Image (cartoon, grey):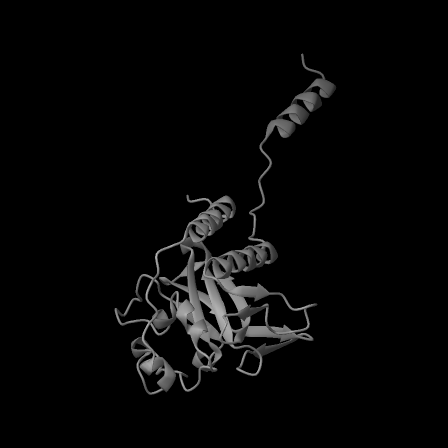
Amino acid sequence: MRTQSSILEIETMHAQSDPVPQKRKHPNTKRTGELAEAAFVVKAASLGYAVSKPWGDSERYDFILDSGPRTWRIQIKCTESLNANGYQVQSTYTDQKKKGHYTAADIDVLVAYILPLDLWYVIPAAAFPESASLRFYPEGNISGRRPRFEQFREAWHLFQQTQRIVNCHPDPELAEGEGPAVSADEETASPSPTAPASPMEKMMNEWAKRVNNLYFPKR
């Protein structure tokens, strides 16, 4: 006959053997942001641009990019979450517990990084919509129309312009798929030809992909 103590011992053994439920891990947004900033430095350097980091964290931009013709104030945003066939970032900042919307007075360009696809969008501040949300549809939106910001996908050639990009704010009367108008400089400027990748650029791109796969392995 089992004693009371032996029954308690058996129950304790069963309780210890039961699997402990694992807490769901939430993405570390700070680490993700650091990864996106590191990837931007690699990408910009591979394209021949000089990148500097401002002292401290009081400015509303993350980097200064020197393209040769001029310098640009860059804010980096990144996302890895797919929602309704699109990826979204917010063109906002938090200053003394108050949220604000980036304007051309704060930054020159917002660079959005789609982490799972290793895609970049180079968006001038003058092209920001009235809302704070910027949605990207690399594979097309549900309506089938051309998404608004696809013209800025991998638009690194914009940094070759000598003046600030103006007059390309999306016209509210245009359909979303038509996209924003561009400045006169953009219309007259011919797109930069795609030069063959140099050995350094190939190596830097390969390094960036390895880092991305390390943090975000394909399922």
Spot occupied by residue 41 in the image (x, y as percentages of width and height)? 54, 59
* Residue 159 vs residue 138, the one in the foreground: 159
Q: Percent from the top left, x then y, of residue 39?
A: 51, 56
Q: Image point 44% across, 69% down: which residue? A: 122
Give left or right: position of 151 versus 115.
left
Q: In which quarter of the image is the C terminus?
A: top left
Residue 94 placement (x, y as % from top left): 63, 73
In the displayed image of the protein, which residue is found farthest to the left? 144
Q: Looking at the picture, does residue 91 appear above or below residue 165?
A: above
Question: Which residue is at the far top?
Answer: 1
Give the quarter of the figure containing the N terminus: top right
Q: Residue at x 29, y 66 (%)?
A: 142
Q: Can residue 134 be seen in this view?
A: yes
- The reply, left or right, for residue 32 in relation to residue 57 is left
The residue most toward the right is 5
Q: Say if 7 sits above or below 112 in the image.
A: above
**Residue 171 appears in the picture as rendered:** no
Q: Specify the quadrant of the image occupied by residue 82.
A: bottom left
The front one of 100 and 165 is: 165
In the visual, does 189 lie left or right of 79? left
Percent across and percent down for residue 111 are 48, 68
The residue under the point 59% across, 54% down is 31
- Quarter of the image holding residue 73? bottom right
Is 134 situated above or below 205?
A: below
